[in-house]
């Protein structure tokens, strides 16, 4: 079953909605993407990380 829980980028609270009901901030999926040993896009993701930096920030607080 797909998880629908989301985390607010502004206040850090968890919710099921796209907009945080407490502060009105945007929310992102709280779980990381599924891991696969046969990662077809891993090469491209590693190249992108080298170009722009190691971590891609999903929220301003991360």
Image: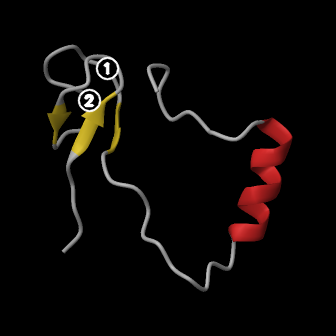
Relative to residue 60, is residue 41 drawn left or right?
right
Tell me how far mark 2 sits from mark 1, CA to CA: 6 Å
Query: Which quadrant is home to the N terminus?
Result: bottom left
Which residue is farthest bottom?
38
**Dot 2: what SS?**
loop
Colour pattern of the rendering: secondary structure
Looking at the image, residue 38 lies above or below residue 19: below
Contact flag, marks 2 and 1 (Cβ < 8 Å): yes
Residue 10 lies in quadrant: top left
Tell me if I can see residue 18 in this picture: no
Q: Residue at x 63, y 39 (%)?
A: 55
Counting other residues with Cα less than 10 Å from the Cα at mark 1, is it few (<14), some (14-19), or many (20 or more)? some
Reading the image, the residue beneath label 1 is 25
Residue 25 lies in quadrant: top left
In terms of depth relative to the viewer, which is nearer, 17 or 51?
51
Relative to residue 37, is residue 13 drawn left or right?
left
Q: Residue at x 26, y 29 (%)?
A: 19
Sequence-wise, which precedes: disc 2 or disc 1? 2
Q: Position of residue 14 (x, y in %)?
A: 17, 35
Counting other residues with Cα less than 10 Å from the Cα at mark 2, is it few (<14), some (14-19), or many (20 or more)? some
The image's mark for residue 19 is 2
């Amino acid at each position: 079953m797909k998880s629908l829980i989301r985390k607010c980028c502004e206040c850090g609270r968890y919710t099921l909605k796209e907009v945080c009901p407490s502060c009105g901030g945007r929310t992102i999926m709280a779980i990381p993407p599924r891991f696969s040993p046969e990662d077809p896009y891993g090469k491209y993701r590693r190249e992108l990380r080298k170009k722009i930096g190691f971590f891609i920030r999903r929220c301003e607080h991360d």
